[in-house]
Image (cartoon, rainbow, N blue to C red):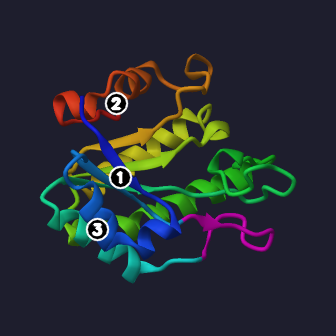
């Protein structure tokens, strides 16, 4: 079994040097998660908040310096999560109109393009495109298009981070569910999007 340590919180970024020192003997991989993208009613997709590219680049460099494999996980967060707890969880992403869904996936694609540039410059070993985006999982064509675009931007392995409590049989493709449940990345050093 392999152990991946995820850098995802502001406190992780702010203490990245000591965090790497404390975990490098137990972590087999590092997954650096982009700081959440908060969205407003004025901007139906993403508005960056909190940490910026310098912190992300530094965290990736520190993880690479550890000698471990490093992944970059790009996660959008909700358009509107008022009244929901935790209010930052990306699983609350949901839209009522097709236009809003199209805007979401276009902006997700633009966000990915920016982070592919950062990731390739940092020498990351794999990418995870989103995590726990429950309401999006029925939108198979949008996800296929997103992975097709991603494969045109990088030759590195691609994946998606799923939460085990989600009803996979209703929402997502069987191939990807098997890849997540049985850990294809860790067993075969590959995640297949097809």
Work out whether residue 130 or residue 60 is closer to the camera in this orientation and state it: 60
Q: Quadrant of residue 33?
A: bottom left
Residue annotated with mark 3: 60
Q: Look at 36% across and 41% down and name the residue there.
A: 159
Residue 15 horizontal side relative to residue 41, left or right: left
Position of the C terminus, as image quadrant, is top left
Residue annotated with mark 2: 194
Q: Quick one: label 1 or label 3, which is nearer the N terminus?
A: 3
Residue 42 horizontal side relative to residue 164, left or right: right
In the image, which residues are magenta? 36-49
Q: Quadrant of residue 41?
A: bottom right
Position of the N terminus, as image quadrant, is top left
Q: Where in the figure is residue 187, as x and y percent of width and height?
A: 20, 27
| Up/down of 58 relative to 22, above or below | below
Q: Residue furthest left?
A: 67
Label 2: which secondary element: loop
């Amino acid at each position: 079994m392999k152990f991946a340590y995820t850098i995802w919180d502001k406190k992780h970024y702010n203490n990245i040097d000591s965090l790497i020192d404390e975990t490098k003997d137990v972590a087999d991989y590092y997954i650096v998660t982009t700081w959440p993208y908060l969205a407003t009613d004025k901007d139906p997709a993403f508005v960056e908040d909190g940490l910026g590219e310098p912190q992300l680049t530094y965290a990736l460099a520190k993880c690479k310096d550890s000698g471990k494999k490093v992944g970059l996980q790009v996660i959008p967060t909700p358009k509107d999560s008022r009244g929901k707890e935790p209010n930052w969880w990306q699983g609350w992403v949901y839209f009522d109109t097709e236009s809003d869904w199209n805007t979401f996936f276009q902006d997700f694609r633009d966000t990915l393009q920016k982070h592919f540039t950062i990731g390739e410059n940092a020498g990351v070993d794999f990418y995870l495109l989103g995590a726990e985006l429950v309401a999006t999982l029925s939108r198979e064509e949008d996800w296929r298009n997103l992975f097709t675009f991603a494969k045109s931007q990088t030759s590195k392995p691609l994946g998606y981070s799923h939460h085990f409590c989600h009803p996979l049989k209703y929402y997502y493709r069987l191939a990807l569910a098997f890849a997540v449940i049985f850990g294809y990345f860790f067993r075969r050093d590959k995640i297949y999007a097809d």
